[in-house]
Image (tube, rainbow, N blue to C red):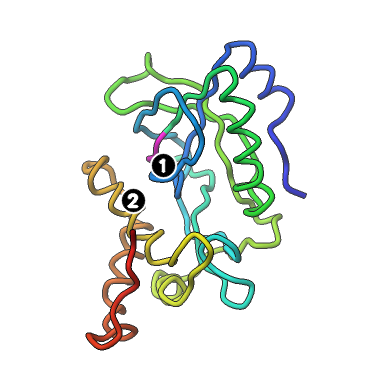
């Protein structure tokens, strides 16, 4: 069953009257909750993977899309955006994210150490992150870059086309973290771009992304 933030997390948040929430997927461009501040940065010891199925936001039960989760990897780090929520923002953001990420997505929560860009060790804070594990029913697991790209190119859901999800995430990395490497993401981006002409011609234009 999807988990809600633990008692320990809630006690930590309300004791300090603030909580940082780390996003590494669609949260980097569409948090959809009220926050006080945000910072680009990374969490060490995790790598981002397109291993989670999505039958609501970026896919359907008949044709699941592919979205990201993170897995423990001591040699990697995952870049994204951390949002600071304070006081009344804490409860409302957690209620919203519990539906968006846990109920609809199958993600669990964990506290991790977040390092803001260019702030070093002294800027590090604990942040709440949502992780899809193999125990949830939508988990798809590993596949080749080409197979993932082929699945993404034909999938769409209530939040839009799966292609948009991939390209927005890649654009974030290219524009906000230009010196960071995300081989998995960039390899799938490259695979997607190479197969697009086979799915969309000049008479069949690409999906429009707002």
Badge 1 crowding class, 10 Å Cα cut-off, few under 14, some 14 to 19, many 20 or more, is many
Position of residue 69 relative to residue 138, above or below, is above
What predominant SS class does the magenta segment belong to?
Answer: strand
The Cα–Cα distance between marks 1 and 2, rounded to whole angstroms, is: 8 Å
Residue at image position (68%, 33%) is 5
Compared across the picture, whether 134 is left or right of 183 comes to right
Q: Are marks 1 and 2 in contact (CB under 8 Å)?
A: yes
**Screen quadrant of the C terminus:** bottom left
**Label of residue 112 in the image:** none
Nearest to the observer: residue 177 or residue 63: 63
Residue topped by disc 1: 78
Of the pair 171 and 126, the residue shown nearer to us: 171
Report the magenta residues as a range.
Answer: 75-81
How far across and how far down the image is residue 27, in percent? 46, 44
Does residue 42 appear to the left or right of 45 in the view shown?
left
List x then y, in percent, for residue 86. Answer: 53, 19
* Along the line of sight, the residue nearer the viewer: 52 or 56: 56
Residue at 38%, 45% (x, y): give it: 29
Residue at image x 44%, y 34%? 43
Instruction: Using the rendered view, name the quadrant where residue 16 is placed.
Output: top right
* Residue 76 visible in this rendered orientation of the protein: no
- Local packing at callout 2 (Cα closer than 10 Å; few below 14, some 14-19, many 20+) is some
**Residue 79, horizontal then vertical, whole percent:** 38, 40
Q: Residue furthest top?
A: 15
Relative vertical location of residue 180 with respect to residue 123 in this rendering, above or below:
below
Residue picked out by circle 2: 182
Q: Is residue 182 visible?
A: yes
Magenta highlight on residue 117: no
The numbered mark, 1 or 2, whose residue comes first in the sequence reads 1
Rendered image quadrant of residue 9: top right
Q: Secondary structure at mark 1?
A: strand
């Amino acid at each position: 069953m999807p988990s809600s933030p633990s008692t320990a997390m809630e006690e930590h948040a309300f004791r300090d009257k603030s909580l940082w929430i780390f996003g590494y997927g669609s949260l980097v461009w569409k948090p959809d909750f009220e926050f006080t501040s945000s910072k680009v940065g990374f969490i060490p010891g995790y790598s981002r993977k397109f291993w989670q199925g999505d039958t609501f936001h970026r896919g359907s039960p008949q044709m699941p899309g592919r979205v990201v989760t993170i897995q423990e990897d001591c040699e990697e780090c995952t870049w994204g955006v951390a949002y600071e929520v304070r006081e009344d923002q804490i409860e409302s953001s957690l209620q919203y994210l519990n539906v968006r990420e846990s109920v609809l997505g199958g993600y669990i929560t964990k506290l991790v150490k977040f390092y803001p860009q260019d702030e070093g060790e002294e800027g590090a804070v604990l942040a709440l992150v949502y992780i899809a594990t193999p125990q949830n029913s939508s988990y798809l697991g590993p596949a080749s870059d080409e197979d993932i790209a082929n699945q993404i190119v034909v999938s769409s859901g209530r939040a839009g086309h799966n292609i948009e999800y991939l390209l927005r995430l890649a654009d974030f990395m290219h524009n906000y973290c230009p010196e960071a490497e995300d081989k998995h993401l960039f390899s799938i981006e490259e695979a997607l771009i190479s197969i697009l002409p086979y799915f969309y011609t000049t008479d069949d234009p690409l999906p429009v992304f707002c």
